[in-house]
Amino acid sequence: MKFTRRIALVAVAAGLMFGASSAAMADIKFGVAAEPYAPYTSKDASGKWVGWEIDLMNALCAQMNEKCQLVEVAWDGIIPALTSKQIDVIFSSMSITNERKKTIDFSDMYYNTPSNLIGPKDGDKDISPDHLKGKVIGVQVSTTHEKYVQKHFVPAGAEIKTYSTQDEANNDLAAGRVDYVQADSTALDAFLKSDQGKQCCELKGTVPEDTEVLGVGVGAGVRKEDTALRDKINAAIAVLAKEKKFSEITKNYPDLIGIIVTPEDK
């Protein structure tokens, strides 16, 4: 989950509250990217937000004893939405990077996963930059993965193609319009297990670590001046980790077991 290009209109998710009885009573606005990012955030058939991060958001708000409201924001406008006070917290798989910390602050890490490359089913698992020369790599725009491809693969001769959503990148890979896609390992794993993913594609490998670009895990983004809110979120994360709440949540998402790293693993 990323920097910004345009300020997007913020749409409040109607009727979805965390510990509040009505939108008018909400105290903290948690911004979530409107684009689906399963298994962390997406909408079910009824339009309700579901996912690992949504469950964690509920648990954090309950632990903080705060009324919270979910607000949908286009991914590439989510930092401007925070800095302009349309939302109070970015809670949407945003990696903690030094570049982003120039603009906003972050809570402690609440999960981390590797970054993977997937491609067509051809058995070729070489993902070295030289081997990908001339290949087209799809990424979601304004993500750490876009920056990684720009830094490590483009100088060696690969091309990059950006998409507004991860689903669009995956669909173009399935259609043969790009050669590879790079993204979070668990998000790509969900695609590979879908009917479309099973037919077209396979895991190529995990890219070498680069914490300067990929960050040190995912955190809740807050405004730099909101130190009290940041500290309160950090305290809630610590309590949930101590009480093994992260494990309880992850049990409901079998595909994440053994892959996702949380504060309980420290």
Image (cartoon, rainbow, N blue to C red):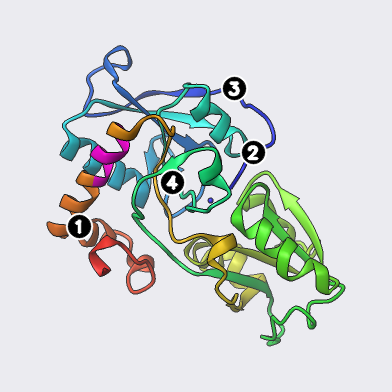
- Check the image and report above or below for 9 versus 42: above
- Could you tell me which secondary element the residue under label 2 belongs to? loop
Where's residue 178, x and y in %? 78, 64
Q: Tell me how far mark 1 sits from mark 3, CA to CA.
A: 34 Å
Q: Tell me how far mark 4 sits from mark 1, CA to CA.
A: 21 Å
Residue on which the image places disc 4: 41
Residue flagged by tag 1: what amino acid is it?
Ala
Give the residue furthest to the left: 243
Dominant secondary structure (helix, strand or loop) of the stretch shown in magenta: helix
Residue on which the image places disc 2: 4
- Could you tell me which secondary element the residue under label 3 belongs to? loop
Q: Which residues are magenta?
A: 229-234
Of labels 4 and 2, the one closer to you: 2
Residue flagged by tag 3: what amino acid is it?
Leu
- Could you tell me which secondary element the residue under label 4 belongs to? loop
Name which quarter of the figure residue 249 lies in. Answer: bottom left
Name which quarter of the figure residue 170 lies in. Answer: bottom right
Q: Are marks 4 and 2 in contact (CB under 8 Å)?
A: no
